[in-house]
Image: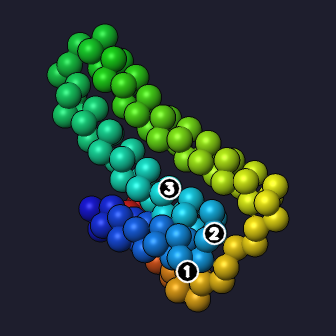
Amino acid sequence: MVHGVVERRGGRGCHRCGLAAGTVALIGFGVDSGIEVVAAGALLWRFRTAGAGARDDHRGEAERKALYVVAGTFFVLAVYIAVEGLSALVSHDEPGTSRLGLGRSIASLIVMPALAWAKQ
């Protein structure tokens, strides 16, 4: 639960920092955090829809739908990053700097492993 809240808040902040600095990397980092929240929601939906007492075919169908939701969000992110990256490369755009973005990235490097360790 705590990880989801941190992901949502941190992702939103990185997304904003990325927009302000014009850097696709920070935007992608922020959107990826949102994708993790969507993936957690899809997994929760899958377990609530087809839990331990469900038939195998019903469980398989729920698993497939949840997988498609997560895969679709990652595909959209990949297309966005590819299009924006190619556009910046062709137009010779350079990303701006963002001290707030750098701070958030450093904070994520510190906080996320600690949260992952705490989840075990």
Residue placed under numbered mark 3 in the picture: 32
Task: Point out the tag, 2 or 3, that comes first from the N-terminus.
Answer: 2
Residue placed under numbered mark 1 in the picture: 101
Residue that appears at 36% across and 25% down? 65
Asked if the residue at tag 1 contacts the one at tag 2, i.e. Cβ–Cβ closer than 8 Å, the answer is yes
Q: CA distance from mark 1 to mark 3?
A: 15 Å
Task: Point out the tag, 1 or 3, that comes first from the N-terminus.
Answer: 3
Residue 58 coordinates in the image, percent (x, y) = 26, 15
Asked if the residue at tag 3 contacts the one at tag 1, i.e. Cβ–Cβ closer than 8 Å, the answer is no
Task: Point out the tag, 2 or 1, that comes first from the N-terminus.
Answer: 2
Q: Categorize mark 3 by other alpha carbons within 10 Å: few (<14), some (14-19), many (20+).
A: some
Residue placed under numbered mark 2 in the picture: 23
Q: Nearer the viewer, mark 2 or mark 1?
A: 2
Q: Amino acid at mark 2?
A: Thr
Residue farthest toward the bottom in the current orientation of the protein: 99
Residue that appears at 60% across and 84% down? 98
Q: Nearer the viewer, residue 86 or 42?
A: 86
Q: Quadrant of the C terminus?
A: bottom left
Q: CA distance from mark 2 to mark 3?
A: 14 Å
Residue that appears at 32% across and 39% down? 42
Q: From what the image shows, is residue 100 above or below residue 119?
A: below
